[in-house]
Every structure is written in C-alpha cells, then in structure tokens.
Image (cartoon, rainbow, N blue to C red):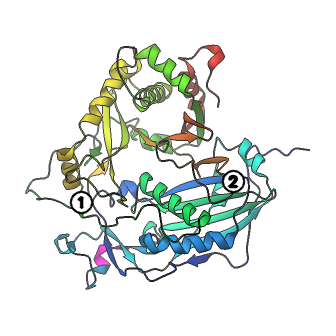
Amino acid sequence: MQRSWDDELPDCCYEEKQPSLIKPSSPTPNHKLYLSNLDDQKFLRFSIKYLYLFQKSVPIHLLKLSLSKVLVDYYPLAGRLRPLLLLKSSSNIEDGLSDVDNDDNNKLQVDCNGEGAVFAEAYMDMTAQEFLEISNKPNKSWRKLLFRVDIRTFVDTPPLVVQVTKLSCGGMILCTAINHCLCDGIGTSQFLHAWAHLTSKSTDNVPIIPFHSRHVFKLRSPTSHLPSIHPAFVKNVTNNPNIVDGLSLNQYLQSQPLVPASLTYTASNILHLKSKFVPSLKCTTFEVLASHTWRSWVKSLDLAPSLEVKLLFSMNIRNKVIPEIPKGYYANGFVLACAKTKVKDLVNGNLYPVVKLIQEAKSNINDDSISGIVELLEDKNIKTDLTRSLVISQWSRFELENLDFGEGMPLHMGPLTSDIYCLFLPVIGDSKAIRVLVSLPKSVVGRFEYYMNNFLDSNNVVAH
C-alpha cells in the first residue's frame, strides 16, 4: 500500500556521533579574508540552502574524503565569519584592510582557520520516489533534512553545513547550506561541481581553481559625497508613501502564513508567451518570464493603482567591470538590477512596456554604476529596498541540476525552503524549461496561479 506524505516528512534518525567537522585534508592559508561591500550586504546574511535527491546513495566515507580534499582549494568554507572589529589586532590581515573604517563594527570578514565544515548523517523511512512526488512544493518539515547548528547569531554559523540523509530505498537526500556572504549562485555551483568531481574521479585537482581575493570590488577612489542612491536600495523608509496600512509590502507578506506556488514553463509555453504579448520585441526567456511573473504577483496582491512597485533581479557582473574579474572568482559577483513602475501601468495592457523596463534596468548595470553601488554600500544605513519589491533569483543558469557524485544525476534539485523571494529553477530532464517557485499568503496563491496560467489555452495549462 502506497504511503502519502501530504505535509509532514517522517522524522530523521541521526547517527550517534553527530555532527562531525570536516577539515581540509592538507594545510591551507591561515589569514583573514576581506569581504567586499557586495559580500558584506546585510541582504546577503543568510545561507543558500540546496536540496538534492539521488536514486542511489554515495558512500559516506567517500563524501567526507572528497569534501576534505575540496576544502583545500575552497578553504574559506572551512573558516568562520568574524566581525572586523574583533580582528583589528591581528597582524595577519590581508593587504588593504587598513583603509576600512575602524568604527564599523558591522563589517564582516572570514577567519580562514581551517576549523572545518559541519557534516551530519541521518536516515529517513521514505523512498526517493515518494519524496519526488512531493518535491515541487517545499514545506517547513523539510528543515529536518539539514542539521540545525546551535548558534546564537548568523555570524556564528559555520559557512558550510552538510547533511546526508539515507533513504529506505537506498537513495539519499543531500542538503547543503552555503553562506551567501562568501559566494553567489555561480560560486556555490562551482564549489558543488568541484566536490562532485573529486568524489567521482580519482583526482585531487578541482576543475576550476577558485580565486578568493575580493580586491576587484574595493573602493577605487572614494569621494567626499556618496553617489546618488541606486533604485535597488533605500536609506530611510520612515514616512515612505509606499506603505500598506503602516507596514511595508514585504512586512505585510511575512506577517502571515505563506504557501508555495510552483509552476513549470516549457520552451513551448515561453514561446507562446512571447508571441502573445511581445511579438515585435526581441527579448530573452528571462525578460519575458520575469515580466509575466512580476505582473501576476502584483495583480494577485490587489495593490493600490498608484503604488510604485519594483522588480529586483540578480545580474552577473563578472564581465561588466574593468578590469574583468578573473576566472574562478569565488565571491559575490552580482548586483541587483531594478525595474520600477506604478501598479496601474504594470497590470494593464500587454507585457511589451514591462519587458522594456527590465531591458533598461539591465542596460543600466555597467562599470560606472557598479562602482557607484560599491561606494554607496560603504554607508551601512543603505539597505536593499524590499518594501514593495519582488526579488527574482535565477538558479536555472548555474548548471546546478547537473551534479553527479558518481551514482548518477539527481532526480530533483531545488531549495530546501520556499520564500517570498522568487526562484527560477532548472527542471531535471528538460534543459529549456524553467520552474517558478515563490511563496505567498494562502488566500493569494490561487489568484497568482490563475494569472500565471491565464495566457495559455485550456489544453496547455502549466503543471503545478
């Protein structure tokens, strides 16, 4: 008789000696790693949590051995975050730290001390196929698939936490939490592929040597006056007119239970979307799907027509700065581009002007604007403007789904949890498809899914 897992996953049984610390297999540099202003944003003070489902388990001892090897090259992941103020007395600080404000006790850096990554092992009475059937919509019970480190603050969280959960069928779930202050999605993919490579191949060489120095994004020539605020940021939200009943839209959404919405778009769906709404405009898959998602999100929330709303989306800037960032750059090499408009202008008409807004936002990200953002972030009162914004992150471009530790590609990959930030995810087995995942209040999810599907014929409704 087939079991049903509508909500709660069964509890995980942990091994007695849990967790262990996996240290680099050979000596690594012992120094303090400077974090750039792009790394040190408060917006990024969380861990990116990935979940992989495999049909067949990889021996634990091999995963631990290869992790210890890969941490030789990716040694900051075996270190610990520290407030800069506590490290000022050290004589082993990288060149260039002397120009950092001594009074800025919020600035973080990495103590590369080789303390180790956290590695937990568990067992769960569930099969890979049973998990696969519910994999599109994460729920809170999935959090048991990643070991919770007993810490007081984010700063105390180890940069890398891993849990391998063996399943009753012989499969496994691999979950990783990688500190976002150390790297972005490209960096996390680079690390995971290096780990998989060392597990499945008899070699000690990683495919890409990581480049850890952040000097590329140090201030070039600070001015006496900070540059004008980029539209993705805000300094003071007091008395902001874009407020919903005294709360920002972001606070309003997070003040109530959220339910994930998951919709998969094939290449055919996306082509139909382009031909229906923007037939005379050359645009990318991201531009049209982001436009459609933003508009559907705003329409589902039934916001005031005069309210100004924003779309923030990550843009890789590795090839947009001068000099170009070295290959293997292992840090945050992205900024948030920003499109903004009034609700009434977003929800009415076709997507043509919305796509144009996104294209203009992309074109505004160049070497000069990136330098301005780096300088702007010197002011720790500057924050990412989430008051009335949808944030989209593209996981579909990082090759995250093509990860083989030696026992085959994953059956599923995605985030451990769903949030109000929107993810564009890869689809296993269809490289041209994209899964849109975002959480919304339960009362709103139905409307959002309706608007997301509304451009399709009844026979081509997107799968949930």
**Quadrant of the rendered image containing residue 340:** top left
The reply, left or right, for residue 73 in relation to residue 321 is right
Magenta segment, which residues?
82-86
**Horizontal and vertical percent for residue 170?**
79, 59
- Please name the residue that numbered disc 2 is placed on: 54
Image quarter where the C terminus lies is top right
Q: Secondary structure at mark 1?
A: helix
Image quarter where the N terminus lies is top right
Q: Can residue 90 be seen?
A: yes
Marks counted in the figure total 2
Q: Residues within 10 Å of mark 2 (few under 14, many from 20)?
A: many
**Quadrant of the rendered image containing residue 80:** bottom left
**Horizontal and vertical percent for residue 268?**
55, 22
Q: Residues within 10 Å of mark 1 (few under 14, many from 20)?
A: some
**Quadrant of the rendered image containing residue 111:** bottom left
- Three-letter amino acid code of the residue under disc 1: Val
